[in-house]
Each structure stands twice: as structure tokens, then as C-alpha cells.
Amino acid sequence: MDNFRREVLKVNKSRVHKVKNSLGVYDAYKWLRKNKWLDMEPISEHDFYAIIRAVNKALAKSFLHLGSINLPLRMGEIILRKYHPSITLQDGKIKTNLPVDWDSTLQLWSEDKESYKKRTLIRLEEKEVFKVLYDKSKALYNNKSFYTLELNRDIKLSLKKQLKNGLLDAFMLCGKI
């Protein structure tokens, strides 16, 4: 089971992360250095990364405590919302928004090769499903459709713990996602 799990999750080899169509922290650092945006002595790349890391940690801590963050300069809001799970039938296929129970699914796949070939998933039975949204409705910048937000794995796991322990709750989201 353990070898099968490692093979399916592809943890035996290193990952290659390549995002070519997005600007990152290094691009921001290069732009600031090139355009002399700050009216002060240039800071080192290490110090710039340390500042970014500290701000990101503070934002993550605040989000895990409150469940929402109002971004400065009218850039929008990051919010946590919950909604009821749904199971529908579309074009003869079952569609659901329930999360996958990966431990049970991988256990099934290791025992039954046919379910692995068909990629049969086992879903969790949850009363409420939570989602992190980036609300840009009140933001005042151009090209809003080009901006997205994706939480990193550590924040997602911490958020899951907070929700399971009942330390955090969210408003119910009305309508479809």
C-alpha cells in the first residue's frame, strides 16, 4: 500500500514547478530596483524576500484568526464562505462538490486495480463545504479578471484544522459557485 501510494502521488521524484505566465516576487524586486521606485537606498534581495515573507505570514495569521482580510488601497477582500454540498445528475453523470477522501480513495485503488483504472473517487460526507474567495467587487483597479488568489498548502492545512476544531466559522454563500 505504501509503495502504491508513493507511486500514485508521485513523491518518489522531485517536482518541477514552472509558471511562465505570471509575475512573482522576483519580478517585483527587479522592477523596483530598475525603476528606483523607493526613494531610499536599495535593499538587498534577501531583505526584500524577508519583508515579503513577514507580511505574508502576518496576513495568513490574520486570515486564520478572522476568516477574512480587507486588502489595503481598495484591492478587494479575501473571504471564507461555506455552502451546502450538492449532488446533481448532468448528462448521465453524477456531479458533486463534496471533497475527495484521499486516504480511502488510495486504499481502494491499492486493493482494486479496476477502480484505479477508472479513477473512482470516494467523497467525504460533509454537512458544509468551505471555500476561500477573492472578492474583487469593491476593488478599484483595472483588469480584475487577470488576478486570482491561491492559498499555499500550509495555510490550507491550518485552515482545515481551525474549521475542524470549531475555532473558525464563515457566512453561508447564497447561489451557485
Image (cartoon, rainbow, N blue to C red):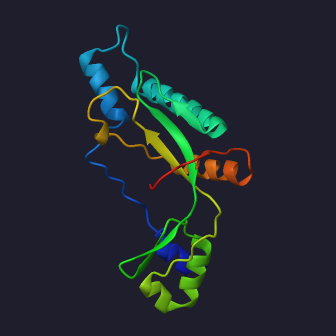
Q: Position of residue 175 (x, y in %)?
A: 47, 53
Q: Which quadrant, please, contains the C terminus?
A: bottom left
> Where on the picture, by quarter, is residue 140?
top left
Q: Residue at x 63, y 40 (%)?
A: 64
Residue 66 is drawn in which quadrant?
A: top right
Residue 73: image x %, image y %? 42, 21
Q: Camera-side residue: 77 or 155? A: 77
User: Who's the residue at 53% across and 73% down the image?
Assistant: 6
Q: Which residue is drawn at the image coordinates 57% and 73% (left, top)?
A: 123
Q: Is residue 144 above or below residue 55?
A: below
- Give the image quarter of residue 129: bottom right
Q: From the viewer's perspective, tell me whether residue 145 is left or right of residue 155.
A: left
Residue at the far top in the pictured view = 39
Query: Please, is residue 13 above or below residue 5 in the view?
Result: above
Query: Which residue extends farthest front?
Result: 175
Between residue 21 and residue 145, name the one nearer to us: 145
Q: Quadrant of the N terminus?
A: bottom right
- Depicted 54 relative to depicted 118: above or below: above
- Which residue: 41% across, 80% down? 93
- Please count the marks in the image: 0
The answer to which of 77 and 93 lies nearer the viewer is 93
Where is residue 133 drawn, in percent x and y? 48, 44
Please tell me whether residue 148 is drawn above or below residue 95 in the rendered image: above
In percent of width and height, residue 157 lies at 61, 52
